[in-house]
Image (cartoon, rainbow, N blue to C red):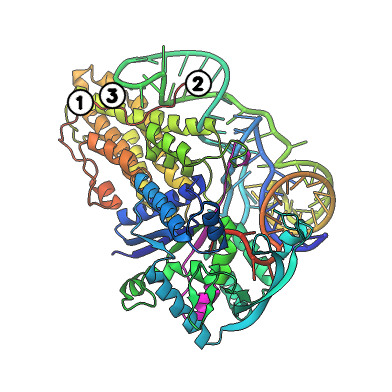
Amino acid sequence: MTDRFYLTTPIYYPNAEPHVGHVYTTMAADTIARYHRLAGDDTFFLTGTDEHGIKMVKTAVEQGIEPTVLVDRVVAVFQEVWKELKISNDDFIRTTQPRHKIGVQKIVEKLLASGDIYLGSYEGWYDEGQEEFVTETAAKDQQYKSAISGRPLVRYKEGSYFFRLSKYAPAVLKYIREHDDFVLPATRRNEVISKLEQGVEDLSISRASLKWGIPMPNDPKHVVYVWIDALSNYITALGYGSNDQSLFDKYWPVNLHLIGKEILWFHAVYWPAMLMSLGLPLPRRIFAHGWWTADGRKMSKSMGNFIGLEKIRELAARYGIDSLRYYLLRAAPFGHDLDWTEADFNKSLNELANVVGNCLNRMLNMVSKYRGSLPALGAMEDLDRNVLSQIRGLGPKLAHAYANCELQQCALLPVELARAANGFIDATAPFKLAKDPQQASRLDTVLHVAAQAIYATLVGLLPLMPEKAEAGLRQLGCDPTGKTIQQLLDAGLAVGHPIAAGQPLFVKPEAPK
RNA sequence: GGCAGCGUAGCUCAGUUGGCAGAGCAGGGGAUUCAUAAGCCCCGGGUCACAGGUUCGAGUCCUGUCGCUGCUACCA
């Protein structure tokens, strides 16, 4: 039975190059997408860019170029980086694309028709120098002066269209309360619930003072503000509102919106409310992951601990993209904040090289030296049965971990099996058995069991470390192409394939001087 | 201030519905050699923040105290 699985990252704001935060979300999503493809699901993985808004206009002005030139330039970098990092997205939506514009205008028309959008006025503190509204809390923090120029903020009022968020908030609250795993992790869910309990006001969804955006279809003096413009990408990318809604019909509702915790409120409240208004089913799950710090402090360029594109490329070049992926997902429980340190990064590299890489390597060496190909399983002992049963457990455990977005477990579970394999090798000592011709049959069995364990480890790592896992499997004489994880695990490593001495799979970190 | 969560071995953390305190890393010791000097085995008696309470029995439930973190309406 094949299911369909649709998952998304947020669409990123391309006023600067991607950094480790973007990479983290995207690699995590890519891992989940690859898992589902490898589970045989009909998978659709979407990412993209959110290109409108005042910040983009300002950045363009600073650089002396038009916004379109800016976004084309930076979006190209995003796309190039995703390609470099082997991100397997099926589509890339840009909010400046005609397909998105058409969809957004269709959505706005529907909401206008149903009366959920109305014309009101937006009033707030306005920074005239910056030409932007400042939020009430920010204004207060700045003592009602411009953070840039220091000039007093002005009370400003402009016409704006509003979405009747207040009408849907009770239904959204009810839905979140009744669906335990709609918003995850649970602590974030609690926050959303308590915030909703305080009540919400209607949402300003247009800007008259801005031109860089999608015009309101009924009133082109206004452009659609970020909420509808950005959030709706998840359905416009599927052709919602266009002549061809086949993708939408197939993949909506989305199985998983993977986002950072800073944008949970919009995804957990605004977006479901909009979908309710449109009469569409809600996402199955919204998962908010944590933030990266570096060396215990918030990452920033001025502090010199910013993990930017250059650093990411350097690490990927030296240790492989997959090792970076492993570290990012293994370093902390998914959903928690986590801290990037060189020491931890090196630890995770050592873990891969010492536990997984070395296990594969010692296996390949012994099999090639003693037998030349994988021997068949003979009479079994408890030790053997024990390992085989751990191997059988891997598939279901991984399935459970992926289903619950426990990505740290997804990284650790296969490695645990390699640990067990190392223990098994030491306990059975095939290198001693090899010296005694009488033990030939026992040696066959031990080599077989150990090889199956490292094989299963690599299969389990395929979603997370596609290149390294496949490279390892090829050294074992297996081509995983076109097979599901379960098929690979069920089939096991084929007996009789010639096996040669191995090449180290992982590079270890340079020893500190 | 309000709401929520957390406070368990040096470090990072696991600990389902209450029933003899766990893992990884770091550190100490040992046996071994197939392997990227990698891996394996042994060594943790920690007031489970503190004080009460419920219970035959609480890290696990309740109350209070202290400490930390997050959220507190337009920040992608």
- Total numbered circles: 3
Q: Amino acid at mark 2?
A: Pro
Q: Is residue A317 left or right of residue A134?
A: left
Chain letter belonging to callout 1: A
Q: What residue is disc 2 on?
A: A512
In the image, is A3 to the left or to the right of A140? left
Q: Quick one: SS at disc 3?
A: helix
Q: Is residue A397 among the parts visible in the rendering? A: no
Type of amino acid under label 3: Pro
**How crowded is the residue under tag 1: few (<14 C-alpha within 10 Å), some, or many (20+)?**
some
**Residue A161 sits in which quadrant?**
bottom right
Residue A11 coordinates in the image, percent (x, y): 47, 60
Residue at 36% of width from left, 38% of height from top? A386
Q: Nearer the viewer, residue B40 or A51?
A: A51
Is residue A26 visible in this depiction of the protein?
A: yes
- In the picture of the structure, the residue carrying the numbered disc 1 is A368
**The N terminus of chain A is located in which quarter?**
bottom left
The answer to whether B29 appears left or right of A133 in the picture is left
Q: Residue at x 47, y 69 (%)?
A: A283
Query: How many other residues sit within 10 Å of disc 2, few (<14), some (14-19) or many (≥20)?
Result: few
Q: Name the one closer to the observer, A462 or A400.
A: A462
For the residues bearing labels 1 and 3, Cβ distance under 8 angstroms: no
* Dot label at residue A430: 3
Task: Say whether residue A376 is left or right of residue A151.
Answer: left
